[in-house]
Image (tube, rainbow, N blue to C red):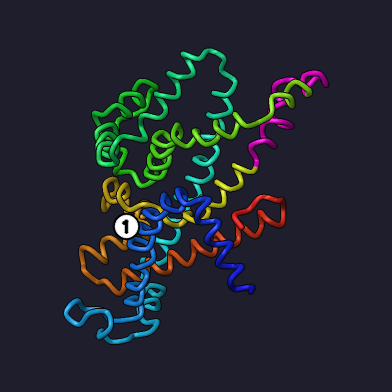
């Protein structure tokens, strides 16, 4: 009876939400083919993989590839650079779209607000190749950035050849490219804050600043927490595309990160097992950060992913 009741509920739910289930099928197929199926390939991190033998027949080496990475002369540099770039991107990049959304929410002129949103959204749609090309040109001795530096009394220099400036250029350009796009979700959250709360706060004598602290921020706090947890889950997963297009041997000391090292080892040197081991290590760190952040968020408040 219980089994038949279960199947009856499933059938009833399917009939009621059939269109929704049909819509989610392409999404499930995508994740199965491009996210779950490739997980089988992670086993080569524990093997000495050669394409001629295949994954199953390649000899098993256990933890040798991980030991090789941990004892590598590049290990400390890669971890340090990845953590610092991720930390600076989180420190300055995460609050940037929130601040922009809060500012736009206070703008009453619809034309100016629409123009500002358009201008800040546009960089997100520019190809990474084009963005890095612009950065390279602007950072040249005769480029725009040096024109500005010279205007304020500085000296011209090839900025991307300076290891001390690389992280600043990387993080600042990332904020410029994503601040407008990232603000969309916070503007949506702001539109859901009850206007009666603002009216009640005004009656109590609260100014704009106190309304921001006691009404606006608590209203969008769940959204901020969820986005922060998701960000922490990809903290160590810095994209290699931008890095390999911007860095050079002169800036390896501060620019080389785990993903760019994986690119060089895996695709250029074709050491697939070693690069897979490094990528698996990086993914485990990201998973740990995600679980830890979610646990802290759940203990400190009511908002978490699960």
Query: Which residue shows up at 47% across the image and 15% down it?
Result: 112
- Image x and y of residue 258, in percent: 37, 60
Q: Nearer the viewer, residue 72 or 266?
A: 266
Above or below, 147 relative to 228: above
Place residue 253 in its image quadrant: bottom left
Nearer to us in this view, 212 or 236: 212
Q: Residue 127 occupies which quadrant of the picture? A: top left
* Residue 108 forms part of the magenta stretch: no
Q: State the residue at coordinates (55%, 31%).
A: 187
Quadrant that contains the C terminus = bottom right
- Is 163 placed above or below 131 here? below
Read off the magenta span: 201-221
80 over 54 or under it: above or below: above
Q: Nearer the viewer, residue 77 or 273?
A: 273
| Residue 66, percent from left and from top | 39, 76
Would residue 111 be visible to someone looking at this image?
yes
Q: Quadrant of residue 190?
A: top right
Q: Taking 259 as reference, is 117 above or below it? A: above
| Residue 207 is a magenta residue | yes
Comparing 2 with 269, the one in front is: 2
Considering the whole magenta stretch, tell me its main secondary structure.
Answer: helix
- The image position of residue 137, as x and y in percent, is 24, 33
The single residue placed furthest to the left in the displayed view is 52
Q: Which residue is mark 1?
A: 260
* In the image, farthest residue toward the right: 204
Which quadrant: the N terminus? bottom right
97 horizontally vs 243: left or right: right
- Classify residue 84 as left or right of residue 207: left
Query: Residue 108: horizontal and vertical position, in percent?
Result: 57, 14
Count of number-bearing discs: 1
Helix, strand or loop at disc 1? helix
Q: Residues within 10 Å of mark 1 (few under 14, many from 20)?
A: many
């Amino acid at each position: 009876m219980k089994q038949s009741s279960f199947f009856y509920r499933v059938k009833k739910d399917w009939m009621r939400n059939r269109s929704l289930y049909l819509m989610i099928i392409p999404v499930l197929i995508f994740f199965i083919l491009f996210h779950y199926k490739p997980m089988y390939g992670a086993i080569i991190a524990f093997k000495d993989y050669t394409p001629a033998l295949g994954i199953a027949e390649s000899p098993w080496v256990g933890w040798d590839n991980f030991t090789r990475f941990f004892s590598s002369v590049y290990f400390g540099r890669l971890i340090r650079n990845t953590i610092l770039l991720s930390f600076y991107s989180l420190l300055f990049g995460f609050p940037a779209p929130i601040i922009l959304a809060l500012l736009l929410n206070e703008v009453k002129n619809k034309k100016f607000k629409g123009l500002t949103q358009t201008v800040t959204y546009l960089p997100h749609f520019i190809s990474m190749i084009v963005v890095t090309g612009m950065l390279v040109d602007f950072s040249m001795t005769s480029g725009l950035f040096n024109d500005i530096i010279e205007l304020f009394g500085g000296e011209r220099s090839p900025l991307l050849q300076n290891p001390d400036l690389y992280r600043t250029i990387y993080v600042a350009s990332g904020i410029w490219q994503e601040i407008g796009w990232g603000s969309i979700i916070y503007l949506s959250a702001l539109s859901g804050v009850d206007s009666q709360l603002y009216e009640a706060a005004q009656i109590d004598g609260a100014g704009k600043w106190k309304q921001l602290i006691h009404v606006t921020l608590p209203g969008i706090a769940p959204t901020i927490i969820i986005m922060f947890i998701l960000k922490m889950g990809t903290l160590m997963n810095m994209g290699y595309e931008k890095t390999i297009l911007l860095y050079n041997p002169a800036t390896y000391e501060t620019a080389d990160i785990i993903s760019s090292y994986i690119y060089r080892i895996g695709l250029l040197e074709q050491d697939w097992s070693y690069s897979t081991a490094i990528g698996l290590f990086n993914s485990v760190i990201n998973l740990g950060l995600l679980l830890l952040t979610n646990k802290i968020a759940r203990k400190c408040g009511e908002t978490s992913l699960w």
